[in-house]
Amino acid sequence: MDELITYAENTWCPGCGNFGILTAFTQAIERLEADGLARKDLAIVAGIGQHGKIFDYLKLNGFYALHGRSLATAQGMKLANPGLKIVVFVGDGDSYGEGVAHLVFAAKRNADLTVIVHNNGAYGLTTGQVTPTSRKGFRGPSTPRGSIEEPFNPLSLMLASGATFVARGYPVKLNHLTDLFVWAVQHEGFSVVDVLQPCVTFNNTYELYNNSVTELKVTPETFEDSMAAARRTDRLLIGVIRDVSAEPHHRQLLGDRRPAEDRRAGSDRMAAIRKTFG
Ligand SMILES: Cc1ncc(C[n+]2csc(CCOP(=O)(O)OP(=O)(O)O)c2C)c(N)n1
Ligand code: SF4
């Protein structure tokens, strides 16, 4: 087991929920590798933001994408090289705001990716502007008098979009979050783990979550029951909210073809072009 953490200086604020995500993910990788996952077959993608710094801290192959475009990049990587397991780290501003169309369509087509959302209810890196999951009344540089909008429920959105694996975790429940990451990566098809990530600087939700987070012990069997679990407001349920199987997008599109590996040599391609165009 090689060291997973790089030498890069960690610049997250002390107490940031991102530390728990990083630790749970490294624990998950250790378990997946013990179970046979080769590190060369794993790639990570990250958006831009506090969450994206995880790319610098993990000694893994991957691609540091643009803000809001990491899902598009990851889907391209998967189609070019279907043998890769791809994990995408996104922020709530990044994925539920700027890149929401990519997220919805990746879920709809069952792209075989794992998406880990660092959901801190704020645009952290740019100092705390409002995002689609900020609570009503949230104050930040873009809403100095408090947000007048209701947040949307990302789990309901993912379920309605057709996601085949939907979960929610909380970094304080570290080993539970590790389990969710392992199961999400093992899932074939689109998997998303929405992580309730406290941001101690712009949206400190530790007390709120410590008082309302409850583990869901059994995954609901029907879509309607999953939706009801996602929508609970009296308690915030963490756990696997939906887990069903369906043919992943790359297999529907390519069968067993692996474009990056099956690529023809330049001379063969030229011969085919000459044959076609005389
Ligand atoms: C296309 C584009 N729009 C805006 C920005 C500026 N920007 C960089 S990080 C960021 C906020 C990121 O917030 P979020 O995705 O919630 O992640 P967090 O920092 O909270 O982890 C923004 C708006 C950018 N880099 N690129
Ligand atoms: S500003 Fe918030 S999200 Fe960014 S490192 Fe600090 S606590 Fe974490």
Image (cartoon, helix red, strand yellow):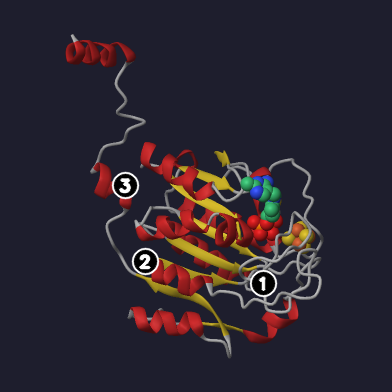
Q: Which residue is mark 1?
A: 134
> Pointer 3: what residue?
250
Image position of 18 (left or right of 36) = right
Residue 157 versus residue 266: which sits nearer the camera? 157
Image quarter (top left, top right, bottom left or bottom right) of the N terminus:
top right
Can residue 128 be seen at all in this image of the molecule?
yes
Secondary element type, mark 1: loop
Q: Residue drawn at (58%, 55%), measured in percent from left and top?
A: 98
Say which of marks 1 and 3 sits in front: 1
Q: Quadrant of ligand 2?
A: bottom right
* Up/down of 79 relative to 235, above or below: above
At label 3, counting other C-alpha atoms closer than 10 Å, the crowd grade (few under 14, some 14-19, many 20 or more) is: many
The amino acid sitting under disc 1 is Ser
Residue, x 67% and y 66% (percent of image)?
Answer: 120
Q: Closer to us: mark 3 or mark 2? A: 2
Label 1 or label 2, whichever lies nearer to me, is 1
Label 2 residue SS: loop
Identify the residue at image location x=28%, y=12%: 270
Q: Which residue is mark 2?
A: 162
